[in-house]
Image (spheres, rainbow, N blue to C red):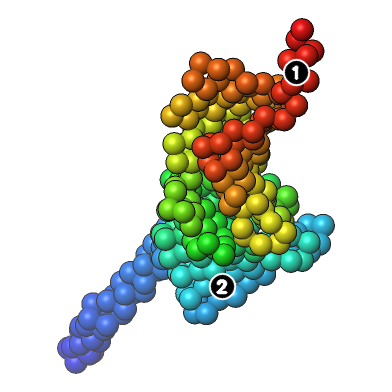
Amino acid sequence: MKNLKNILFLSLLVFLFVEVLIIFPNRLEHKEEERASKATATAPKSNQPEQKMNGLHYVETQEQGGRDWEFFAEAAEGSIGTAAFDLKNVRVLFYNKEKVSFTVTGDRGSIDGKSKDLRIRGNVVTKSENGYTFKTPSIFYSSKNRQILSPEKVNMMGPADELGEGFELNGRNMLVTVDDDLMSIRESVRGSKKFKDGKAFQISSEKAEFSGKSRQAKFIDRVEMKYGTLKLQGPVATFHYRGNSSLINYVQMQGGIKVSDVDKVATADTVNLDLLKNMFTFRGRPKVIQNNDELSGEEIVFLEGGKKVKVEKVRAQMEKKE
């Protein structure tokens, strides 16, 4: 009987030993694993990108068909959940009727995978296919409106011509409408260009528009131009180019023009400036006051930059007044 009690006592000790030292820690370990698993499942997802790619190339199409834009990036990081991607060293081609109209490059960019909108920042350069170059700190592309926008400072350089560098312009608030091939600067426009004779041609306005199809440029609202000692003011000025070249053929001002020089002032409905010939033609009730003498006629021409004045049909005007 005593031996049986000893056996039972030893068995109980062995059971307690196994339970305390082996089974209980094992159960505890499983519970810790379950807690850790639940914590992992309920923890917020990391903000780290889910995808990393090198040498990315992507083409986006419009709803009605045809390419919208095509971009190239040296590297890209993106999140599948948010459909947003960050790009490095980007180049984007914007299409109009299956032809490239504008090319934008920049240091960094991002794409919204849902809206297809783009943002590009850092040394951003926007180039039109006909040679205009716009430099801005950043741009935003609205895929819905097919517009490239930058509310910041903008520097524009026109195409080079036979005389050298192109027309340079500074302003703010750039808007590019891809479907119309139209570029505009909508605030504080200031531009200049030097000609062979060394004279600087300067222009300022509230707004400027440039065509991506032709080389026509238009300056709108409070336009002021200076060429040598000559100063012209009016509401609208349009640059017309010679054929398909980048050379300015003439500048036309419309809507009531005021002109002043060292020794004369003039007014007219329209003025055409031939900067290469250094000749200015006034039409539409033109009038010139020089040395207290008033001249009027159907057409008045300033030759040699205003050193000589030619009045057409001045006698007929005088007879009509009588």
For label 1, the crowd category at 10 Å Cα-Cα, with few meaning under 14, some 14 to 19 and many 20 or more, is some
- Give amino acid for label 2: Phe
Report the residue at 60% width, 50% height from top: 277
Residue at disc 2, secondary structure: strand
Q: Which residue is mark 2?
A: 72
Q: Nearer the viewer, residue 23 or 143?
A: 143
> What residue is drawn where x is 62% and y is 21%?
295
Which part of the image, by quadrant, shows the C terminus? Answer: top right
Q: Earlier in the sequence, mark 1 or mark 2?
A: 2
Q: Is residue 75 above or below residue 198?
A: below
Per the image, the residue denoted by label 1 is 317
> x, y (%) of residue 312?
72, 30
Picture layout, residue 304 above or below residue 255: below
Relative to 102, is 52 on the left or the right? left
Q: Please say whether residue 71 is visible from this viewpoint.
A: yes
The amino acid type, in three-letter code, at marker 1 is Gln
Relative placement, left or right, of 315 versus 109 is right
Q: Position of residue 36 (x, y in %)?
A: 36, 67
163 relative position to 48: left or right: right
Residue in the image at 78% along x and 14% along y: 319
